[in-house]
Image (cartoon, grey):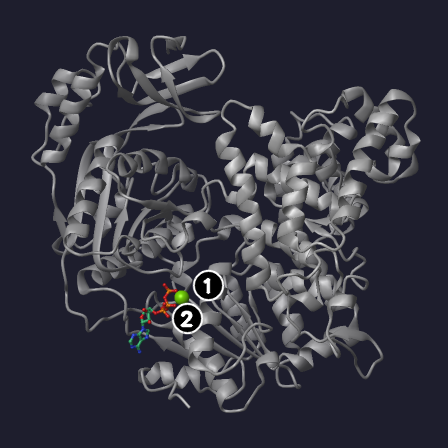
Amino acid sequence: MQNLLHNLNEEQLAAVTLPPQSALILAGAGSGKTRVLTTRIAWLIQTGQVSPSGILAVTFTNKAAKEMLTRLSAMLPINTRGMWIGTFHGLCNRLLRTHHRDAALPQTFQILDTQDQLSAIKRLIKAHNVDDEKFPPKEVMYFINGAKDQGLRADKIDAYNADERKKVELYQLYDEQCQREGVVDFAELLLRSYELLSRNQPLREHYQQRFRHILVDEFQDTNDLQYKWLKLLAGVPGQHGSALFAVGDDDQSIYAFRGANVGNMSAFEREFQVKNLIKLEQNYRSHGHILDAANQLISNNSKRLGKNLRTDAGQGEPVRVYEASSDLAEAQWIVEETKNLIADGAERREIAVLYRSNAQSRVIEHALFSAGIPYHVYGGLRYFQRAEVKHAIAYLQLMDNPHNDSAFLRVVNFPTRGIGLRSIEALQAAADQYGISLYAAVPHVAGKAGSSLAGFVRLIEGARFETQQMALPELVRVVLEHSGLLTHYQTEKEGADRIENLEQMVSAATQFVSEEGYGQGAPAHLGPAAQAQSGAAVINQDGIEILDADAPLPAVMSPLSAFLSHASLEAGDNQATVGQDAVQMMTVHSAKGLEFNNVFITGLEEGLFPHESSSREHDGVEEERRLMYVAITRARQRLYMCFAQTRMLHGQTRYNMKSRFFDELPEESLKWLSAKVQSHWFASPKSAWDAAPVLGSDNAIAQKIAHKSAGSGWRIGESVQHAKFGEGVIVNIEGSGPSARAQINFGNVGMKVLDLSIAKLERI
Ligand code: ATP
Ligand code: MG
C-alpha cells in the first residue's frame, strides 16, 4: 500500500485526514487545494471509510475530472471508471439518464449547446411573431439561463412590466418547445436534476445515503443553483448527512458574470456549521517574484477573506515586461521569447500564452505559425461545433431522437433535396396544429412537399434500420455516406478540410467507445436494458428501480446517446492536437486550475485587461483583478507580461494605455525590457524606422512591414471593405505586384487570404 500522506505539509495533512464532517479549505493559488482534495478521496478509500461508489466529486472542467481519475488510479489499485467524479453538467447528465422517467424525459434526450439553444430561441421568437429587435434572441437566452441558474421556472418569476412579462412568456414557451423535442440546455441539466431530487424523496434519500462524501473543487465559482443542488445531495448536516468538503479561493472567483456567487463560501460555513476551516499558505507552484507580484496585486481588492502566500522556492527571475508598438510587434516578441525558451530546453507544452479575449489570439497564432512553432488553442471553435460536424451530428441525433426539431431543421434540406421554405412552413403549421414534432408531422403534409419530406423521413428510418447491428464507428461512417454529406463536400471547392473533419468523426467514435468501456463491437443503438450486465439495475427498499450507479456508462446509455452527449458536453478539447508538444494558448478564464513553467500574459491594456465591460459592472474591476491574479499564479518559473500601443480589434485600430495593473505590482519584481515607443508606427513606414525600439524584434518587423507594403499599395493594419465578406483588417501581405496576396481578418467571416490584384477591396 502506498503511503499517500508522506508528501503533504502539516496543514495539508490535517485537511486530508479531517473527520467526516463539513469542511472548508480556503487557500490561495498553488497551495495544493486540488492535491488535497484528490488525496483525501484516495485516503478515505484506502482507509476503508468509504467505497469508491460513496464518493461524489465535482470539478470545474472535464479535463480536471479526467486528471483526478488518472491520479486516483495511480494512487490506488482500484477501477475508477464508475466513479462519480465530473463536472456539474456531466454528473447531472448521468443522473437524468439513469432516472429519465422520473425526470419526465425520453431516455434519448439530447443536450443543446449554447449555439443550438440560441437557434432554438430564434425559431421560437419567429414562430410567435415576436419582434426580435425588441427582444433580441441573445437577451432572451440570457434571461432564461439567468432564471434557471437561480432555480426559477417561468411561473415563479414576478414580472413588473409588459416587457418582462413577454420574456417570462417566452421562457415558458421555450421550456414547452424543449420538452416536446426531448432536448435540454446546459442550465436545464442542473435545474431538472435539482427538481428531480427535491420532488422525489425516496430517490433523494437513496443518493444521500449513498454519497457519504461530497467534495467540490473551485467552490468559489459555484452559482446559486449548484450550491442548492449540493445542499440537497448532502442532506442535513449532523443528521446522517454526508460530509461536504469544499476547497476554494475567494481571490480566484472569476465567473460572477455567469451567476457564480462567492457568497456561497460564507453561506456554506454558516449553514453547514463548518468547524473545520483550514487555510493553506505555503505555495508550491511559483517562484518568489511571481508570488510577490500576485500577492501585491490582489491586496488592492477590498472584499477579501484574507490570506497570504509564501514560498520556499527562492525569488527566481523577475517578471519580464515588454511594451510593444503594436499587436503584431507584441506577437513577434512572444515568438522570439518562445524561441529562446525552447532553445534553453523548455518543452513547448510548458509554455502558455494567456489572453483576456479570444479575439486576441489570431495575431499570435499567425506569428507562431509563421515561425513554425506548433501551438494548440483551447476553446477556439471546438471540433464538435464546426458546421460540417454539427450537420453530421444532427443526422445522428435524428436517428436517436427524431423529435429534436433543431436537428431536423438543420439537415432536412442539407445537402439540398428540394425541400423549400414553403414546405417547411406547411410542416410547421401541421406540427403546431397537432402539437407534435416536425418529424411526426410529416405524414400530415400533402402534395409534392409531403412526398419530399417523406423521402427525408425514409432516409433517416433507412439509416436507422441498416445500422441496427452496427458498432458506433461503423454507424458513423454509414451516416456520413447516406446523408450525402461526404458527396456534398467533395463537390465544394474548399471542401477538403471539411471532409477531413467529417472523417475524423469515425476516429472520435472509435476512441470514445474504447475509452468509455463499450465493447468495440457493441451495437450503437442498443439501449441500457440489453447492455446492462446482470445486476446493473437494483430495486431499493422503497421499491424504486435504481440503476446501480457504479455501473459504467454502458448501463445507462446506448453508445450512440452517450456519444452525442459527449459531443455536447465534452467538446472542449480539440482532439487532433491532444498529446502533441505544442505551445498552449487560452483565455485566462480557461487557464484556471492549470500550471505551466512559463507563462505569457498578453494585451495588458486598459479596456482589454481590465476589460472595458468591467467599468460598467458593480465589482467589475475587482473581478478583473482576480482574473489577473489567476493569470499570474499559473506560472511556475518564468512570467512574461506584455502590451501594445496600438491594436486591431474587431476591425478597428485602438490606441491603448498600459493596464493599471502595472501600477499595482512591486517594481522590484519587474524587469522592463523595452524603451518607450513614441508614435503609432503604422502611420507611415518611415515613422516605424524612427521609432524602432531597443529590442531587435520590433525593428525587424518594422523593416519587414515597410518592405511588404511597398508595391502592393496596401498596408498592414489598414481597414478594408469587401463586397462579400464585409469589413476587415489586413494582417499580412505576401508577394508583390500581380502576385501580391493579403491575409485579412474579417469581422464576420474570420481570416481570409485574397489576391490583391483580383479582390475588390475598398479602403475605409
Ligand atoms: P489553484 O488555486 O491554482 O487551483 P491549487 O491550490 O489547487 O491551485 P495544486 O494545483 O493542488 O494547487 O498544487 C499546485 C502545485 O503544487 C502542484 O504542482 C502540486 O503538485 C504541488 N504541490 C502541492 N502540495 C505540495 C507538497 N506538499 N509538496 C510538493 N508539491 C506540492
Ligand atoms: Mg486547483
Residue 274 versus residue 674 in the image, above or below: below
Please state the horizontal and vertical placement of residue 467, each as a whole percent of the image. 74, 49
Number of dots carrying numbers: 2
Q: Residue 230 carries which label?
A: none
Could you tell me which residue is drawn at 92 percent across and 37 percent down? 434
Q: Does the closest atom of ligand 2 sit within 8 Å of the Cβ of label 1?
A: yes
Label 2: element kind = helix
Pinpoint residue 81: horizontal percent, then vertical percent: 57, 72
Mark 1 touches mark 2? (CB < 8 Å): yes
The image position of residue 739, as x and y in percent, is 29, 12
Question: For mark 1, does the 10 Å Cα neighbourhood hold few (<14), some (14 to 19), or many (20 or more) residues?
Answer: some
Q: Mark 1 points at which residue?
A: 64
Q: Is residue 85 left or right of residue 694?
A: right
Whole-angstrom CA distance, mark 1 to mark 2, is 9 Å
Mark 2 = which residue? 34
Question: Which quadrant of the structure image shows residue 75?
Answer: bottom left
Work out which quarter of the rendered image holds the C terminus and state it: top left
Residue 434 sits above or below residue 554 on the image: above
Dividing the image into four quarters, tell me where ligand 1 lies: bottom left
Question: Label 1 amino acid?
Answer: Ala
Tell whether 605 sits left or right of 612.
Answer: left
The response on whether ligand 2 sits within 8 Å of label 2 is yes
Helix, strand or loop at disc 1? helix
Q: Height in image: 338 above or below 226? A: above
| Tag nearer the camera, 1 or 2 | 1
